[in-house]
Image (spheres, helix red, strand yellow):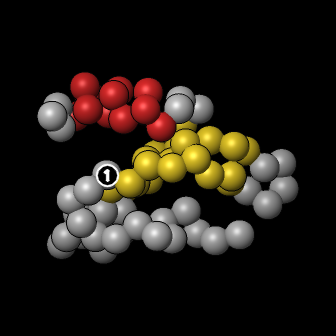
């Protein structure tokens, strides 16, 4: 097991991947991570949506396109 933000670097690119959270009662989910330069930590969102669905929703919500 590793931290959710392992592999996420402080860039403008959105990181998305299927992950398993928690050692006990594990949860398969999609992780969306954004870590912009100048910030100490990334934003992490865990969802039950597929990576493609989650990205479409995030783009709509944040107007990232």
Kindly identify the residue that appears in the image at 21 percent across and 59 percent down.
12
- Judged left or right of residue 2, residue 6 is left
Query: Which residue is found at the position 25% from the left and 25% from the top?
Result: 60
Residue 20, horizontal then vertical, whole percent: 68, 52
Q: Looking at the image, is 21 positioned above or below residue 50?
A: below
Q: Is residue 50 above or below residue 43?
A: above
Q: How many marks?
A: 1
Label 1 SS? loop
Q: Residue at x 32, y 33 (%)?
A: 58
Residue with the most extreme front position:
52
Q: Which residue is mark 1?
A: 14
Q: Quadrant of residue 15?
A: bottom left
Q: Residue at x 28, y 70 (%)?
A: 10
Q: Give above or below for 19 relative to 51.
A: below
Q: Is residue 31 above or below residue 9?
A: above
Q: Is residue 17 left or right of residue 11?
A: right
Closer to us: 26 or 56 = 56
Task: Give the position of the C terminus as an image quadrant.
Answer: top left
Crowd around label 1: few <14 · some 14–19 · many ≥20 (10 Å): some
Q: Position of residue 1 (x, y in %)?
A: 71, 69
Can you give x and y, in whole percent of width and height, for residue 35 in the image?
30, 62
The picture quadrant where one finds residue 2 is bottom right
């Amino acid at each position: 097991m590793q931290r959710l933000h392992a592999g996420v670097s402080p860039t403008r690119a959105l990181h998305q991947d299927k992950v398993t959270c928690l050692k006990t009662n594990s949860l398969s989910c999609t992780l969306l991570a954004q870590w912009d330069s100048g910030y100490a930590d990334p934003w992490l969102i865990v969802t039950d949506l597929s990576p493609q669905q989650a990205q479409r929703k995030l783009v709509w919500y944040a107007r990232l396109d």
